[in-house]
Amino acid sequence: MITSTFSRPLQRSFVSIAILFAMGCAGPSLQDEQTRSASSTKTHAHEVDSQIEQKLTEPLQTSEAEAIVLSAARTIDGRYKRETDRSALAPASSRLLRHPGDALMIHAPFAENNTETYQDIEQSGVKLTRLAPVSTFSIDVDTGSYTNARRMLQRGIMPPSDAVRIEEFLNYFDYGYSAPKELHQPFSVNTAVSTAPWDAQKHIVRIGLKGYQPDSSKSAGSNLVFLLDVSGSMNQSDKLPLLKRSLSMLTSQLTENDKVSIVVYAGASGVVLSPTNGNDKLTIENALNALQAGGSTNGAAGIEQAYQIAQSTFIKGGVNRVILATDGDFNVGISDHNALIELITQKREKGIALTTLGFGQGNYNDYLMEQLANAGNGNYAYIDNINEARKVLVDELQSTMQMIAQDVKIQVEFNPEVVAEYRLIGYDNRALANEDFNNDKVDAGDIGAGHQVTALYEITLVESDGKFNDDLRYAKPATNAHSTNLNELAHVKLRFKQPHAKQSQLIEQIVYRDEITNFEQQSGDFKFAVAVASFAERIKQSKYTQNLDYQWIASTARQVKGDDVFGYRSEFIQLVNTADALK
């Protein structure tokens, strides 16, 4: 688990240096400056304090800002060696924020006591097919990791490695998979194989799912309970005010068939809007506008109350869901994560799902938000701006709310006669034991209406010279009859349950060797997915990214950007360029 803290002395030192460079009064050369003592440096920093306060909010041209960061970083690494070390340089870069006028400006970093929390995840390794031919994992439709990392990059900070979950980067984007025509098989299965652009000795296998899109006009209605954090930690512009605007956009789409309730929690929980028809816009809007932040965070009491209301207004055959919106800072009541997860797990058995919406920075608990959504058979999104609110709560509302398949698992068996080794890219905290695949009591991810899921494997063929592992001296040839078919790369199996069903169904599909194409011959959507996964691996500092280059990622994504109606792909390209500048 990662907890970051930015010290005040470092903040002052960095800004002092930056101001000196910005004003053109940096003084002697860097080499001369490095010979100064730490004490004289601190004294000099103190002398410019009054200038710092005046300059903190003045915009700088991009070239000036970049020069300041480079110069200040070098200076901190040398002149301030006794106070800090190279690891402090990344948070120091948080002073550069995008200015509305397309300039960059020096800005104070996140709060002094930064306690953002992320799960410590070990990345999946390369598997020898003859020893472990089967890979099993739960699907994931969350996107919170991508938008949270986007928030950090746009503020000039490289995200911590554990904040990057590759599958949530992949699943943020639409890849144009064809959807099934009928609900009896609630999602389509799309496979493709190409050479790997980063290594001629390797290949990429893509597995893509696309959920069925039912007619929303035939819905029995939605029973939504907003569980809103109004504690003191939410009293920031990117938290409660953004939350209120986001939910206002959601409720504007509801009808008389829908029900809305609002439960808030801080030091204590309470109902601020009893169940109200979705078309009573004024009452709902007034309840949202009246919300104010203050107090500590007793989230567990609020969760209990929200589920009680959801159960009392349950719509049979409709959408029944609690929507938890918070920065994840639970500090009163049940603060133990396992107890909270157990509570949510019990509630989902009554047919009420949980969606978590994350807001804010500084004390954000990404780890808890993802865990609660998983336990509640829901999904997790991080909302960093009003455009993301529109994407999640307007454009993708039906996907977010309406589940079409539950406990969806994927199992891939690779043919050891053809595939020497493989690794799953992402889904590191979604791995399942192979025996869990056929066990209907084991929980897995759910797919909403129209949702897409993408998974990529990097594989190495038997004849390749680029294997990570040596051939086994005493390995026996495979005896399974299916493995003698040298045109089969892999056998893909998917298990799922229809909503509220107890027994799973099976889908099977073979991936054939003759499906392999050159990467350049693949579709634009395939190439973009590979670019996204490459970017996530690069900023995650994966040990498998030695041949991945930011410029190649940006160039590839730019070539296949397509129509990009909402600008999501263009924004991704800008993030790649930003990461390249920050590296």
Image (cartoon, grey):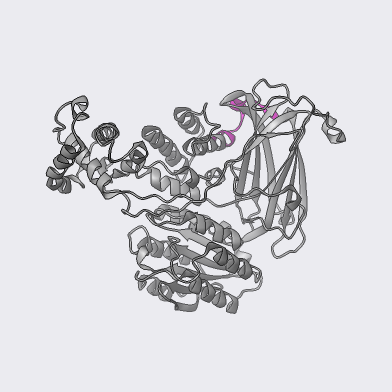
Above or below, 239 against 143 in this view is below
Above or below, 64 against 473 in this view is below
* Residue 278 visible in the picture: no
Work out which quarter of the rendered image holds the C terminus and state it.
top left
In the rendered structure, the answer to whether residue 127 lies left or right of residue 305 reads right
Which residues make up the magenta segment? Answer: 516-528
Asked whether 526 falls inside the magenta stretch, the response is yes
Residue at left offset 33%, top offset 64%: 235
Magenta region's main secondary structure? helix
- Residue 342, horizontal then vertical, whole percent: 60, 66
Q: Quadrant of residue 446?
A: bottom right
In the rendered structure, the answer to whether residue 277 lies left or right of residue 125 reads left
- Residue 221, horizontal then vertical, whole percent: 59, 70
Residue at left offset 61%, top offset 30%: 522
In the rendered structure, the answer to whether residue 293 lies left or right of residue 390 reads left
- Residue 551, horizontal then vertical, whole percent: 44, 28
